[in-house]
Structure formats: C-alpha cells, structure tokens
Image (cartoon, grey):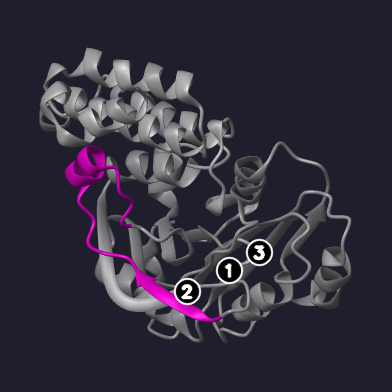
Amino acid sequence: MVIESYFQNEIVWPKISVITPSYNQGRFIEETIRSVLFQGYPNLEYIIIDGGSTDESIEIIKKYEKRLTYWISEPDKGQSDAINKGFSLASGEIICWLNSDDYYLPNILFSVAQKFKDNLEASIIYGRCNVIDESGVFRHLTGEPFDLERMLLKYYTPIPQPSAFINRIKAIEAGPLDDYLHYLMDRDYWYRLSLTGEVLFIKEVWAAFRQYLSAKTSTLSADRIEEIARVTEKFFKNKDLPPHLKKLKRASLGNTYLKCARRYTRISQRKKAFTKLMQALFIDIRMAYRQDWLYTAWKLL
C-alpha cells in the first residue's frame, strides 16, 4: 500500500517501522528505546534485534516488551544482518533504523510523516543530527543537502544515519543492506536508494548520534579502510548507472584510493598505503599533480 492512501483521512497516520539493532549497549539502550516509544506517534511499529547481548541489555528490553512490536536476542552476522532481519519483519510504509546508542528528539515522527505526505516519491527524507559524546554532551551538528556527484567525488556523507527515514517501496526496489559491510553499509545503501527516487534534506534536527572512542564508527582499522574502497568500486559496477554518473568513475575511484592511502598512513600500515596510492595513480594519472597525492607519497619515503 502506498503512502498516499494513508493521508486520505487526516486522522490516520502512516505506519512508521523503527528497527534497533543492538549488541551489549546496556548503558545506552534504554535512552534509545524511550526516545522511540515516547514519541506519542499513533501508528508506530518498533522492532529490536539484539545480537545475543551478555550485559544488562536484555533486562532493559524486557522492561518495555509490552510496548514493542517484536524483539529477539540471538547471534547474528553483524549490524547489517540485524537490520535486514528487522526490515524483513517491518510492515510500515516508512522504515528506518536507530542504533542502540543513538536517540530521537521528541515528537519528530509526526514531522517525518508529514514530509513523506508532501513528497510521496522520495526515497529518503532526512533531517539534521546532533553529534554528542559518550556522556550526551553536545559536540556539533551534522547534515546538509544531498548531492550524489559531490558525495562520489569528495567522499563525504551528507546523510546522518539516525535522522534518515526511507520509503519502504523504494527500499524493496533497492534491496537489503549488504551484510558483507560492517562499517559503511549505510553509505552503500544511500547510493542505491538515491537511484530509486529523490533524496530530500530537512533542516530540522531529528536525532542525536553518539560518537565516542569505543564506538564502531569512531574506529580506524584496515577493515574499515578497505570498505571505503569496496563501496565505491561496487557502485561503479552497476551497469545501469546514468551516463552523468558513469563519467565520474575515474575521478571518484582515484579520490577514494587516495583517501584510503592517507588513512593507512595514520595507522602506520605503509605497505597498504603505498598500494592504495599506486591504485589512485593507475586509475587517474592526474593524481600525480595533486598536492595531497604528493604529500602522501612524501610521507611514505
């Protein structure tokens, strides 16, 4: 059923399905759960997929289980797998996931529903996001208008994941998250969803994203760096890309490999840094004239 049918009667709100993947986030998950359940939204489906937590997470989830649509705790293959499990159970016209250390600001689901009413063909609608530290202290604000070409060329991510909401029809078209990706599954998903419909940015602040040293998104590892390259390579393997995107392949891959090289230097993996640096040069010879390429090469001498 399309979103539009839910607005023929202004009293009826579209169903919004929120998925929370979780694993050993007992110190944060209660704030996450309460931020969803206390939205006061009348047509909410809330699903928690726990990966077999061994801390206090299960006790906390059980406190709220009467208000949950569904929850389970069992081993999985990681965050992407957990989110896909949740999506397969979701029946809402609008779907999203909220990690168990992030939270929504009050009453934002009403705004989300209204934005989808006004933009029925949108694939993603997202707001801004407060970035907070481990204690919940505000650090900065993130989120800016979507520009796929700039995203490919500059390797930045304008969409703060906790504030992103997805048209379920478009999600079915794009397919599930890639469960081989453990760090950049959202970036890969935004790429694919952006090919199915419009991506809209709303200046309202909708969520808070927690950033701290032990958080997965804050870690810099070889696996994470390799995913940076893998996601860009995967995007350009799509044979159905429109011509204006296909022509960005050389520059995008060159920038991506250079970014990987710089990050490998930060964790002192010189051999891998050199390999990525050479890949950047091989894919785009113009790299040899760029200051950032030359600087990275100099650091490896």
- What is the span of residues highlighted in magenta in the rendered image? 137-158
How far is the residue under mark 2 from the one under mark 3?
12 Å
* Residue beneath disc 1: 102
Q: Visible in this render: residue 235?
A: no
* Residue beneath disc 3: 100
* Residue 199 covered by magenta stretch: no
Image marks 2 and 1: residues in contact by CB distance under 8 Å: yes
Question: Residue 124: horizontal and vertical position, in percent?
Answer: 34, 56
**Amino acid tagged 2:** Ala
Q: Residue at x 58, y 68 (%)?
A: 102
Using residue 169 as the reference point, say whether residue 220 is left or right of it: right
Q: Nearer the viewer, residue 2 or 71?
A: 71
Using residue 20 as the reference point, say whether residue 128 is left or right of it: left
Q: Secondary structure at mark 3?
A: loop
Q: Nearer the viewer, residue 106 or 168?
A: 106
How far is the residue under mark 2 from the one under mark 1?
7 Å
Image marks 1 and 3: residues in contact by CB distance under 8 Å: yes
* Residue 150 covered by magenta stretch: yes
Q: Is residue 213 above or below residue 156?
A: below
Q: Is residue 59 above or below residue 298?
A: below
Residue 286 found in image quarter:
top left
